[in-house]
Image (cartoon, rainbow, N blue to C red):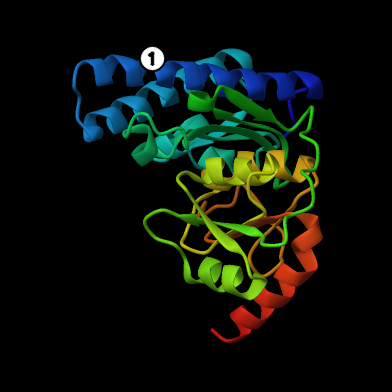
Amino acid sequence: MSAPTYDPTDDHLLAADLAEGAGAVLLGVRAELEGRGASASELKAAGDAAAHQYLMRRLAESRPGDAILSEEGTGDTGRTGTERLGHPRVWIVDPLDGTREFSEPPRTDWAVHVALVSDGQPVAGAVALPAQDRVLNRVPASVLPPPPPARPRVIVSRSRPPAVALHLAEALGGDLVELGSAGAKVAAVVLGEADVYPHAGGQYEWDSCAPVAVASAAGLVTTRLDGSPLVYNNADPYLPDLLVCHPHLALEVRQVLDLWLASR
C-alpha cells in the first residue's frame, strides 16, 4: 500500500492544531456541563464523545487517506478498525486522556493526544493540556529540561501507585509526585517538573504514543520498562508498560529496573 504524500511540516502543524482544537471543545463541554451541575459520569461521557467526534471529523477532512486508531473508536470498522494494520500512515489519538481528572473541575492534569505513526514509530505528535493552556509538539521540540535535583522526582498515579515506581523512588532517594493522566505525567517530565515516569499498570498505544513523540523529541529516554523499544500500530494495541526519564538518570534507572525485573 503506497503512502499519501504530505509535507512533514504540515503533519506536525496538523497534530498540534487537532490537539489544541479538541482541547477547546473539551473546555467548552466542561464549562457547560459544570454550570448545569452535571455528574462526573456525565462529564466523562460527554467529553469523550465530543473530542472523539471532533478529531474524526477533522482527520476525515484533512487526511482522508490515512488510517486511525482512537481509544473511543476501537469498535469501529474501516479507517478506525483493523484496516490500519500495515497502513503506512496511522493516526493514534486519545481524545481525552484522564477522564477522571476532566470530570473533577478544576483539575488540570488531563490531556489530548494526537500522533502520526509510520513503520511503528511516531513521526508527528502533540499533547494538549487544555486546562493549562499548553500544547507540546514534536516539532518544534521542547528543550531538554535541566538536570534532575539531588532527590529525583518520580511520578506516580494518585490512586494506584505501581510498585515499580515506589521501588524506584526509594532506590534513587527520590520524592514522589502524584499526577493524573499519562499525558500530564509525561508532560511534567518534558517541562522539567518531574524527572522519571515509570508505568507498569497497563496502558494502550493511545495512552503513550503522542506523549512519547513529544518526550523523545525533547531528548528524554523513552522505552519499555525492560529497555526495549516502544513500537506502535500493533494488532493488539495493549502496551502495558513505559519508561520516560531524564537522560542524566538513564543509567542509574536502568540498573535499578533491571534488578527489580529480575526479582519478579
Picture coordinates of residue 65 (x, y %)? Answer: 63, 23
At horizontal 28% and vertical 28% (from top left) the residue drawn is 43
Looking at the image, residue 50 lies above or below residue 113 = above
Amino acid carrying label 1: it is: Gly
Q: Is residue 76 visible?
A: no
Q: Quadrant of the N terminus?
A: top right
Looking at the image, residue 76 lies above or below residue 202 = above
The local secondary structure at tag 1 comes to helix
Is residue 105 rendered to the left or right of residue 83? left
Q: Nearer the viewer, residue 52 or 104?
A: 104
At horizontal 65% and vertical 22% (from top left) the residue drawn is 16
At horizontal 45% and vertical 54% (from top left) the residue drawn is 157
The residue lying furthest to the bottom in this view is 263
State the residue position of label 1: 28
Q: Nearer the viewer, residue 200 or 192?
A: 192
Q: Is residue 69 visible?
A: yes
Q: Residues within 10 Å of mark 1 (few under 14, many from 20)?
A: some
Quadrant in the rendering for residue 4:
top right
Picture coordinates of residue 258 (x, y %)? Answer: 68, 78
Quadrant in the rendering for residue 127:
top right
Quadrant in the rendering for residue 32:
top left
The residue lying furthest to the front in this view is 150
Looking at the image, residue 123 lies above or below residue 262 = above
Picture coordinates of residue 33 (x, y %)? Answer: 26, 19
Q: Nearer the viewer, residue 157 or 82?
A: 157
Q: Nearer the viewer, residue 11 or 251?
A: 251
Is residue 219 rendered to the left or right of residue 112? right
At horizontal 75% and vertical 18% (from top left) the residue drawn is 10
